[in-house]
Amino acid sequence: MKTMSALYKNYQRADLSFERGEGVRLFSSDGGEYLDFAAGIAVNALGHADPYVVRALKEQAEKLWHVSNIFSIPEAEKLAQRLVDSSFADMVFFTNSGAEAIECAIKTARRYFYDQGQADRYEIITFTGAFHGRTLGTIAAGGNEAYLTGFGPKAGGFPQVPAGDLDAVKAAINDKTAAILLEPIQGESGINVFSTEFLRALRALCDEHGILLILDEIQCGYGRTGKMFAYEWAGIEPDVMALAKGIGGGFPLGACLATEKVGASMVPGTHGSTYGGNPMACAVGNAVLDRISEDGFLDHVEEMGKYLSWSLQQLAQKFPNEVLEVRGKGLMAGIKVNQPAGELVAKLRDQHLLVAGAGDNVIRFLPPLIVEKQDIDEAINRMEKAFSA
């Protein structure tokens, strides 16, 4: 009898599985209780088993799951209008994942210039440290050699410049440039926050040269920083934006948002998705948005984000040889540590605290947006135990 897993071996999985969750806690198959400060890597925005979202899922499950985009889907129409009403955008394309949302954003930008009679404008400037997904197009945009190796020639059209280097961006702009693509806060590479001044300068550059600004808010958007979208802190608006993760609260859902001017280029036949915007996903998406739109919800996220940052700063003062730097915005926080991040993630798991590692030797804290002060205190206490041990 086979005992090995039939799954691909591309993940280094912990020998730990869970059978249920409640709020900010997960319960393992062997009865252990864990404090979840990873939230499925910023996915479970409302924690686990939120009663309102569960009820919406059950109600929709008894009616209709999938029909395809051959037909009108009222749940998708409703969610799209609500996203438009809460953002810069006029149009929405639904996907199943963040990588698909970025693919749509790339295609939308290129198609826009094609329709303007400028088919040679297809290059999209990206930044070192970026992560935009795992498709052939999105790994090319991300530029990480570890993700590119072994998959043939890198897809062209993605010149990359050092993160935060405005002069490098200016030098990279040419007559082939269609857009600039970035995460306002880089997650995978270590919670690197682009400054308000830099984001405003990029917006001004785009306006000056007639190019598009594409924001990847898959991880940093949808309330995680204390505002609905991270770009709001800089007082700017993009032309195109990719969303996923928190938008479905754990159910697979993503979206590409665009202005009417840009999105109008995506006419019938230019793009599609079999599952994208299905009734089930959009019913859940509407329920998640109901919760995030509640009075005081984002104020709570901002308050908890400040408390988490303060708590991590206190931890850094107590363990200066262990915690080298505190980074982040809102409930997207990280600490650079003086030991291999993977080893510390494992030690914290032993303390029944779940966090996520990242590049640059960073531990990511991405708790559900419903987290409370006592949960943060408990997480810090478990961090202290891990460092002391």
Image (cartoon, rainbow, N blue to C red):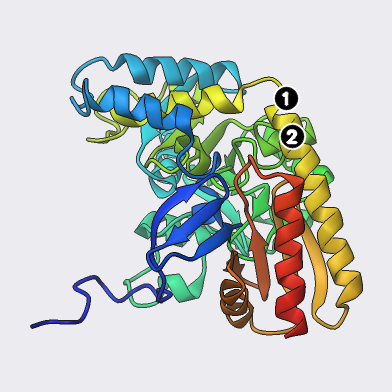
Residue, disc 1: 296
Q: CA distance from mark 1 to mark 2?
A: 6 Å
Q: Position of residue 301 (x, y in %)?
A: 72, 38
On screen, residue 3 versus residue 158, left or right, reads: left
On screen, residue 227 versus residue 66, left or right, reads: right
372 and 88: which is toward the camera: 372
Q: Position of residue 83 (x, y in %)?
A: 52, 22
- Residue 353 against residue 94 in the figure, above or below: below
Task: Name the kind of residue labelled 2 in the image.
Answer: His
Say which residue appears at 27% left-offset and 23% top-offset.
Answer: 268
343 and 354: which is toward the camera: 354
Q: Is residue 34 visible?
A: yes
CB-based contact (under 8 Å), mark 1 and mark 2: yes
Q: Residue furthest front?
A: 31
Q: Is residue 277 visible?
A: no
Label 2 packing within 10 angstroms: few (<14), some (14-19), many (20+): some
Task: Name the kind of residue labelled 1 in the image.
Answer: Gly
Say which residue appears at 47% left-offset and 27% top-offset.
Answer: 52
Assign the C terminus to one quadrant of the image.
Answer: bottom right
Q: Find residue 300 and name its label.
A: 2
Q: Find residue 138 and name its label.
A: none
- Residue 349 against residue 223 in the figure, above or below: below
Q: Secondary structure at mark 1?
A: loop
On screen, residue 347 versus residue 231, left or right, reads: left
On screen, residue 366 versus residue 93, left or right, reads: right
Assign the N terminus to one quadrant of the image.
Answer: bottom left
Label 1 packing within 10 angstroms: few (<14), some (14-19), many (20+): few
